[in-house]
Amino acid sequence: MDFYEQTDAFTFELDSLVDRYMRDFDINIYTIVGVLEAKQKELLEMGQGFEFRPEEDDGPIDFPPDFS
């Protein structure tokens, strides 16, 4: 899978997971958002030790244009 297919797969899986918890569990949207915010913080903290090395860079990622 390329970058875009992996991103789509993650997005669809996350959408399905959130939909399932809202449908099958007694959990409100504020709790879900809070858990997602905590996970976002955890992921960002994991990346703080990341050191960018241009010599190892595969080049820029060409993101599709944002038409929103």
Image (cartoon, rainbow, N blue to C red):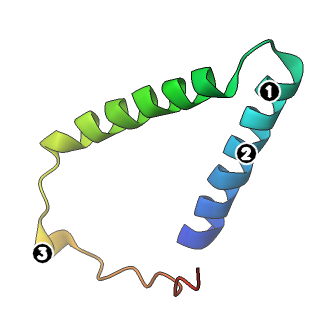
Marks 1 and 2, Cα distance to the nearest angstrom? 11 Å
Q: Earlier in the sequence, mark 1 or mark 2?
A: 2
Amino acid under disc 1: Met
For residue 66, the mark is none
SS for dot 3: helix
Residue 9 percent location from the top left of the image: 69, 56
Q: Give the vertical position of 44 relative to 23 (above or below).
A: below
Residue 28 percent location from the top left of the image: 70, 21
Q: Do the residues labelled 3 and 1 touch (CB within 8 Å)?
A: no
Amino acid under disc 3: Glu
Q: Are marks 1 and 2 in contact (CB under 8 Å)?
A: no
Q: In this view, does 15 lie to the left or right of 37?
A: right
SS for dot 2: helix
Q: Give the vertical position of 8 relative to 44 (above or below).
A: below
Q: Earlier in the sequence, mark 3 or mark 1?
A: 1
Q: Quadrant of residue 41?
A: top left
Q: Do the residues labelled 2 and 3 touch (CB within 8 Å)?
A: no
Q: How crowded is mark 1: few (under 14 residues within 10 Å), some or many (20 or more)?
A: some
- Residue under numbered circle 2: 15
Which residue is rendered at x = 80% and y = 12% of the image? Answer: 26
SS for dot 1: helix
Q: Give the vertical position of 63 relative to 53 (above or below).
A: below
- Residue under numbered circle 1: 22
- Residue under numbered circle 3: 55
Amino acid under disc 2: Asp
Residue 52 percent location from the top left of the image: 14, 61
